[in-house]
Image (cartoon, rainbow, N blue to C red):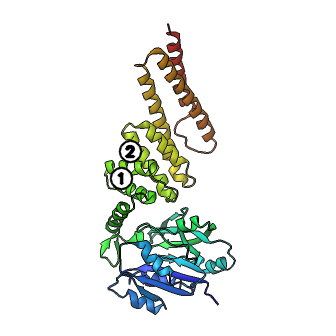
Amino acid sequence: MKPLLSLCMIVCNEENNLPRCLNSVKNVVDEIIIVDTGSKDQTRPIAEQFGGVVLDFEWNENFADARNYGLERATGEWILVLDADEVLEEKSQKAIRPLLQESTADAYECTLRALISLEPWQYIDRKTRGWIRLFRNDPKYRFRSMYHEAVFPSIFEANGKIENCDLIILHFGPLSEKVQGGQTTRSERSWYYLKRAAELEPENGNLQFYLGLEYYQQGDLENAYKTLKRAALEINTKMANLYQTKNGLITLAQLAYQREEFDLAFGAAKGSLAIEGYPELNAPAYRLSAEAFLQAIDQAIRRSTSLDPLARIQSLRQCVRLLQEFQAELSQSLSTHNAPPLTVQELQGWLENCEDLLQKAEANLP
């Protein structure tokens, strides 16, 4: 009889984390497939103590290749993917097999619970579209991208049925900056592989958003602006991580606003709002969209003073129309958002001022 569930992992020098991870699934999975990319510590013996099949993989700086190498050896109907610094949460350990035994889905989106403190217990839950660690063992389902690798695109393209579930994976990684047995820091490793991956995959919108946000975090605003603008306007981001895309568009809106590119700032903020989920990001996006919109209107009004009378009237009429449309949109948003960026009354003042300018311009026509 075919086993139900295979665990697939890639590891390197994880003797400190691996026992905790494997203890959480030793009574849950039917087989353990460990792809080792060059450990020098006790990682291999530990994996074998838990009954794991350890496969040696010559590291080629491609996380997807390493993951897929392990998938090729899995025999279970389903595959669970974990990293060494992760643990399947206790309730999820009890729920996973009953879920799979009755499932009609092809893959499940789980919750990543990033631990930021153990005493007191503090964490951040992230549930992102496309964050899939549990999926059927199907040769069509394989990871892509050398960094920030994901199986979601291949499942999506194969029309696989993806469902949400209540399973939680605990991530202990944020508690320590050191990775791979202390050989390097998490930020150093991430930056190295992210830059390399983005250079090798320049049309990967997902990587470009990650790269732009990392530039921003490092204070390199010029490269952040260029990278995020390219990701937003020039690259297909259909398969991009939605949280990173939404956050990236807000960051682009901020940078464009600072450069007084208000049309771009408004468009980026509106694009962010069009992405469903992550309501905590909506407030800054609404604020930016409103501020950028009004600054763009102000620019248009100022520019209109240098136009001939008919062109000035045409420009002011367009400003009035845009203000009316934005006012209607804002009125509608009041019923669904607790903290609108400005009140309808404030916007009414802008509209009345623009209408007054338009009336005066029309009255001054010869």
State the image quarter where residue 261 is shown: top left
* Three-letter amino acid code at the position of disc 2: Leu
Q: Is residue 283 above or below residue 301?
A: below
Name which residue lies at 65% across and 71% down.
105
Residue count near mark 2 (Cα–Cα under 10 Å), binned few <14, some 14–19, many ≥20 = many
Q: Position of residue 257 (x, y in %)?
A: 40, 40
Whether residues under marks 2 and 1 lie with C-beta atoms below 8 angstroms apart, the answer is yes
| Residue 255's disc number | 2
Q: Is residue 275 above or below residue 194?
A: above
Name which residue lies at 55% across and 62% down.
129
Does residue 353 appear in the picture of this structure? no
Q: Disc 2 on helix, strand or loop?
A: helix
Q: Position of residue 1 (x, y in %)?
A: 64, 90
Query: Left or right: 163 with respect to 182?
Result: right
Q: Is residue 165 above or below residue 294?
A: below
Q: Position of residue 167 (x, y in %)?
A: 59, 72
Residue count near mark 1 (Cα–Cα under 10 Å), binned few <14, some 14–19, many ≥20 = many
The residue where tag 1 is placed is 216
CA distance for labels 2 and 1: 9 Å
Name which residue lies at 58% across and 37% down.
330
Q: Earlier in the sequence, mark 2 or mark 1?
A: 1
Q: Position of residue 273 (x, y in %)?
A: 54, 47
* Three-letter amino acid code at the position of disc 1: Tyr
Does residue 73 appear in the picture of this structure? yes
